[in-house]
Image (cartoon, rainbow, N blue to C red):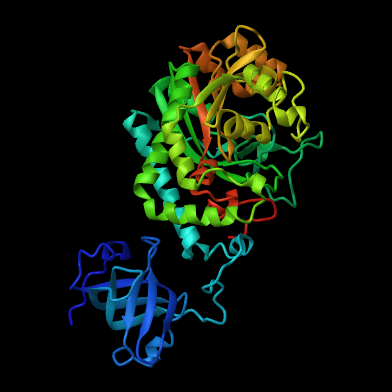
Amino acid sequence: MTVPVRNKIKKLLTGELVGENVLAKGWVRTKRGNKHVNFIALNDGSTINNIQVVADPAIITEEVLKHVTTGAAISVVGKLVESQGSGQSVEIVAENIEVLGKADPEKYPLQPKKHSMEFMREVAHLRMRTNTFSAVFRVRHALSYAVHEFFHMKGFYNLHTPIITASDAEGAGETFHVTNFDLDNIPKTDEGKVDYKQDFFGKETNLTVSGQLEGELGAMALGEIYTFGPTFRAENSNTTRHLAEFWMIEPEMAFYELDENIQLAQDLLQYTVKYVMENCEDDLQFLSQRAQDEEKNKPQTERSEMTLMERLQFILENDFERITYTDAIDILKNSKPNKKKKFNYLIEEWGADLQSEHERFLVEKHFKKPVVIYNYPKDIKAFYMRQNDDDKTVAAMDILFPGIGEIVGGSQREERLEKLQKRMGEMNIPEEEMWWYLDTRRFGSAPHSGFGLGFERLMLFVTGMGNIRDVIPFPRTPDNAEF
């Protein structure tokens, strides 16, 4: 018998090859049956749907079938036929099964039963074999592709900014140090400080917290660029929203002012959500059902008013509400939860830093649509943001989403050298370390803007998952760098 070319299960399930001999390879999800017939659910990762393999013990020997267990990798040759049973349209009647890799059912962790998310994180090296995580990571691929497609269509250039830098764009100091020193024998200066001149780069370096500053350099030459890469924060935060290593999408655009910056961010979010809805329907339907099942375990007050699919549609159908920070503070100050002291952080005066509970109130309860807040107090924002004429606010903007809170943060950048130098002085940022950044203001400065979109935050929104550790393949968090 001539062995046919392997087809992915996604293609076999279309039914195009009914009546033909086919070859499928994958991992066994379940096997059930009796001495007359065995039904094997096979999955190869190309789709959330399994294909059923019908194995007749008169054709496939017991010696082979006993090793066809959950988790085993097998190769199946047989005829693709229209299914006799309910639940699937086609199935493979096996003529030959080869076990490529055994999985001892006594030891394989992912037996066909419900597992907790905590358990799944302990077996993150295997969790992509489950329905939930295979769906999440197929969506992650589609979302990533959509980001690149969006910017390519807009004429942006993808710029690879450095992962090792000597700057801290956010000024928060929560960086991972990079060194090739022998940590048991660190060279010191005469004053007893670490002698970084002897280190690999000849100066103190760290893993990047943002590609923004280098991205600005690209924008001031190429016009419109975007970075899409890993960023690192040494923030000892064990929440459902924080990772130590995460991915950021950071466009920077010459000649854009704040309004154009906001519009680009809205267009990007709507484009990527639409792309995933059109290209990951089966996975999203599964994740939507999963999210609804999870909602049933929450107290009534915490349940979402919309299903996952409704939330995604909601983003596409609504223009984002744009309000100033001052207006947002007025709304929050006069809101029921603030007056009745239901907020954990009460809003008492202008200048307060908005918390997730405030952001979600504005989106989910007050406006019932995505919200853009702009013109924030300069004292709670970074040094590089353009100062407004009132000398109190900067041309910053945040975009808030239901269930997530802040998903995008950006601003028009300060292009005026003197203003930037003055602000750096106020915030104790040494000019000599940022000479290269200031040069873009010395030579051919122009208005420009940009924003950062946390890719995992977007993933949380699109998949309906509750914890950021479950939308990145191998989460890096305090005390956890296992896989």
- At horizontal 64% and vertical 34% (from top left) the residue drawn is 203
**Quadrant of the rendered image containing residue 124:** bottom right
- At horizontal 63% and vertical 44% (from top left) the residue drawn is 241
Question: Which quadrant is the N terminus positioned in?
Answer: bottom left
Instruction: Classify 353 as above or below 124.
Output: above
Where is residue 106? Give x, y as percent.
56, 82
| Extreme-right residue of the structure | 191
Residue 296 lies left or right of residue 40; in this view the side is right
**Quadrant of the rendered image containing residue 188:** top right
Instruction: Classify 41 as above or below 169.
Output: below
Q: Is residue 82 visible?
A: yes
Residue 228 lies left or right of residue 170; in this view the side is left
Instruction: Classify 27 as above or below 270.
Output: below
Where is residue 309? Give x, y as percent.
45, 46
287 or 445, which lies in front? 287
Figure disc tally: 0
52 or 432, which lies in front? 52
Instruction: Classify 267 as above or below 304.
Output: above
| Extreme-top residue of the structure | 389
366 or 211, which lies in front? 366
Where is residue 452? Give x, y as percent.
53, 32
Where is residue 296? Give x, y as percent.
60, 55
Residue 443 lies left or right of residue 93; in this view the side is right
Q: Is residue 160 visible?
A: no
Question: Which quadrant is the C terminus positioned in?
Answer: bottom right
